[in-house]
Amino acid sequence: MSTPSLRSLFLLLAFSATACHHRPKTISFYYWRTTFALDSTEQKALRDNSVQSLYIRYFDVDWPANDTLPSPVTPIHFDSIPTGYTIVPVVFFRNRVFQQITPDGIPALVDKVWALVRRINASAQLHPQEIQFDCDWTDKTKDRYFTFLRRYKQTTGLTLSATIRLHQVKYPDRTGIPPVDHGTLMFYNMGNIDAGPGSSIYDRTIAHRYTPSLRSYPLTLDLALPVFSWALLIRNGKVVQLLDKMNEPMFDKDTNFACPSPNRYLCFHACFKKGYYFQQNDDIKIESVSSDNLREIVTEVNRHTNHRIRNLIFFDLDRQNLLQYDKHLFKKIRDHTD
């Protein structure tokens, strides 16, 4: 067999690098409700975006006050079976679980989590090959959390992924690198929940403090992007409640409210709305992420990862969230990562 010329070898390597660089990214969604049931808008979004994978929250794990052991919270119920999709169960851990558990308690926790995951899989006739754990661990809880991850991998043999926050990317020497097959960078919930002008969902200034650290982060990453909104109920200058799944159109035509400035509403008359009670003179601050913000995020992440992000996962699949955006947005954002 003849030896290829250096020029031919260079061209082959360049072609391989280009092919890898332009590997089409997939679009996925998180599903974060306690009952799995897709409406027509959600089903159409999955079809239109050729979605193959769904990341479904199975349950939370918490350590309630006065309890002696951690326990699962609000396991999901399947009203319908998500056929035709690769399902990735997601289990959310409150960090206090790993603050309170002892090393001797971790094997039992692994068995308890794995048993409930299997029961949910059986109820929906699912056979996932991957599981994702969502925990905002700290330098003080990393050892016990990482021990849990290793033990879970040994017990189940599944592919493991973990959510990664920006502060964990910036300070890996302090917070450690989770022992998983890959991570998902959660690019939201980075600001303070307060009455000021900034957004707690996405703040460009805060993000810029962390994204340069992506260049050296060793885990392969997917990118989770926010397509949700909420409102902050401000009373006497202080945030008193976070109002989930509230957006500006809900207030625009309601005569009980006025809009004195962008994304802010003032309550004229005490009233109930979407199950929430508003007093006269309450201030409502809407927080959401625009299409331009999403493009900005992808541009920033690409710049610091040299386009090494694998796939996109949007949080979260919900009719109300989908209706906030142009139906072609998700493909446009995906194409913006190339």
Image (cartoon, helix red, strand yellow):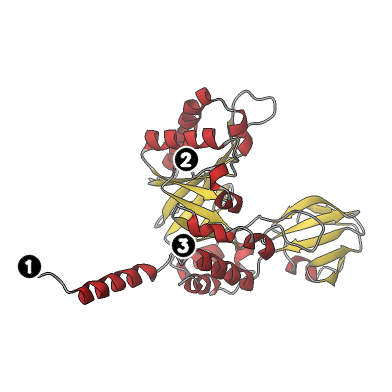
Q: Amino acid at mark 1?
A: Met
Residue at (69, 25) in percent of width and height: 66
Look at discs 3 and 1 and give the one toward the viewer. Answer: 1
Is 9 placed left or right of 104 in the picture? left
The local secondary structure at tag 1 comes to: loop
- Image coordinates for residue 116, horizontal then vertical, percent: 48, 35
- Image coordinates for residue 121, horizontal then vertical, percent: 43, 42
Q: Which residue is mark 2?
A: 120
Mark pair 2, 3: CA separation: 31 Å
The quadrant holding residue 98 is top right
Is 27 placed left or right of 285 in the picture? left
Q: Which mark is residue 1?
A: 1
Q: Amino acid at mark 3?
A: Ile
Q: Which mark is residue 131?
A: none
- Image coordinates for residue 143, horizontal then vertical, percent: 52, 34
Look at discs 2 and 3 and give the one toward the viewer. Answer: 3
Q: Which residue is mark 3?
A: 309
Pick whichever of labels 2 and 1 is earlier in the sequence.
1
As rendered, which of 265 and 308 lies closer to the eye? Answer: 308
Residue at (53, 49) in percent of width and height: 163
Look at discs 2 and 1 and give the one toward the viewer. Answer: 1
Pick whichever of labels 3 and 1 is earlier in the sequence.
1
Mark pair 3, 1: CA separation: 38 Å
